[in-house]
Amino acid sequence: MKNIVIGRYIPGNSFLYRMDPRTKIIALIVLMVAVFMIPREAFEMMFVGLGLILILLLIGKISIKRVYLGLRPLMFLLLFTFVFQILFNKTGPELQAWTLNYSFLNIAVIVAIVVFWMYTKRFIKAKFIYLILMIIAIITVLNQLTLGPIFATRQLVVHEDALMIGFFIMMRLIIIVTLSTVLTLSTKPTDLNLGLEAVMKPLKYLRINTEEMAMIISISLRYIPTLLDEANKIMLAQASRGVDFSEGKLKDKVMQIISLLVPMFIISFKRSDELANAMEARCFVPGATRTRLHQLFWSRLDTISLVTSIIILIGSIAVRVVT
Amino acid sequence: MAIKFKKVDFKYQGNDNKAYLALSNITLNIKAEGEFITLIGETGSGKTTLVQHMNALLTPLSGDVEIFGVKINRENVKKKRVKLNPIRQQVGLVFQFPEYQLFEETILKDIIFGPKNFGVDEKTAIERAKNVIKVVGLDESYLSRSPFNLSGGEKKRVSIAGILAMEPDILILDEPTSGLDPLGRNALLDVFYNIHTKLNKTIIIITHDMNTVYEYAKRVLVMRDSYLVYDGDPIELFTKKNIENWNLDVPDLLHLINQIETDLNLKLPKKPRNETELFTQLKAVLK
């Protein structure tokens, strides 16, 4: 629970912390566009992108471990997109082909492997690597063993494009999530709110209430850690009534999740109600013009950062044009 | 001894990677039967952390806790050598805020949720629910109501009923009387006292009310800044000079007794624990 860092501000002292939130938000958007500009054909450029991110983390004094912890919940999504690409993308030259033999005995062996994995995974620390190992083991069994009568054979063909695109999409996700983690790690929620509001100002001409939207976004970011703490407390309270969140059958698991979610919803509604009252008690009127306690200042650092991000964007556009 | 703490330390990890000390060097023994303990101390002194250790919800950072023979320390829990769930049936813990545990459609379902998790069959669990709802001072008609349309005090009672239905050997209550009116508070304290006297079960109550401590407790634990600074008799505690340093206060009755003793210039043979005792002693002395 504590490892989820999305939306958590970690105090620090580096140029990232001194930057104007507006610059950070615009730079984030510019860099994201830059990442999306890189065409699939030039997937080597992703390494350049990754290198730039690492440099940013190093000179921004943001611990790579923190960012890694933020990426960890995404691991399964990343693996899923990768596997999906390999299974269904059938373009480009063939790299490697495996014959998969399906027989009843083979399937029995696979079931045994899955059961073994399910029972032993709790003792293994590197769960993700263990999952990959299990998938490799299953493929090897299907490929090598020919026990009993085979009733179907299939080819598992890995194409170069599949590997490349899978890798490409993975990199793209990692870079984008890292960039946004850097933003939330280095910006206080209040500053983020101010920045968002300023950046979204042009939307006013489309009759969109930007102030309210900025408020909604910043409140939800602010409440992520609070709600996580609440979830932790609820889990303790239910654990004391015999709910074992670490084990149990599927049917029990459903009950466990309900016992966590219902109080969670009730508490969130109550909290939002209380927050609304507290805001009204301090004379918050939606849409009223307000003066600010914190003024945003544009410094030379911001100009340099923004120019750098735009140069990176131009670079990636150039790569797209060239290839 | 049912619960044994041996040099237990615990720290919370803050957002800024600083560690906040919650328990330091706690050594403590609690019997399974016949104890009525109150745990007091200023807010943030580690009371809740301490009782969560008694329920094996938290694992000590160093040192070990032994609950009904099950040794809980970092190593045992990490390697999953011990089963924690049965402990939670033996030691029932009622949390401070009932909102954290109520989730079912009806109060009946919510009360039987705990017992069913510990393998009690539904029929017995319903029997117990019908019984405990009366014990906490509500009537059976509540069982079919939703736990969310209740007042704060009623929610509190339902959450206590949910733990009582598990029939734990030791009952721990984290501020059970906060948010209750005076009458309801006394009624509930009497419920705990009755459970204690009739079934001879050990009860541990976290409270900020010195009167409760003085009237009911046989033993009092005082926490301050993560240390256990006092473990012993309540009368002895309150006759100490420097209890203000621990952010504690002398109970009303003791104030009254001290006033009577100085003004009337007499000495009561034994410090009375409630009004009735005070008056019987006074009558005897004044005769």
Image: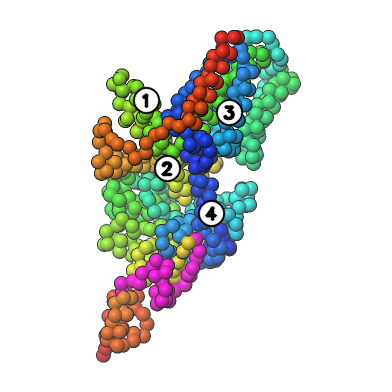
> Mark 4 — residue?
B11
Q: Are marks 3 and 2 on the same chain?
A: yes
Closest to the observer, B162 or A290 = A290
| First in residue order: circle 1 vs circle 3 | 3
Residue B114 position, x and y percent, is 44, 48
Residue type at the position of mark 2 = Thr
Residue at the image position 54 percent from the left and 20 percent from the top:
A311
Split into 4 quadrants, where in the image is the C terminus of chain B?
bottom left
Q: Are there few (<14), some (14-19), or many (20+) residues within 10 Å of tag 1? A: some
Residue B263 magenta: no
Residue B240 magenta: yes
> Mark 2 — residue?
A226
Residue type at the position of mark 1 = Met
SS for callout 2: helix
Q: Which residues are magenta?
A: B226-253
Residue at the image position 45 percent from the left and 66 percent from the top:
B222
Vertically, is A237 above or below B189? above
- Check whether the beta carbons of the residues at disc 3 and disc 2 lie within 8 A of each other: no
SS for callout 3: helix
Q: Are marks 2 and 1 on the same chain?
A: yes
| First in residue order: circle 3 vs circle 2 | 3
Mark whose residue sits in front, 4 or 3: 3
Q: Are marks 2 and 4 on the same chain?
A: no
Disc 2 from disc 1: Cα separation: 26 Å
SS for callout 4: strand
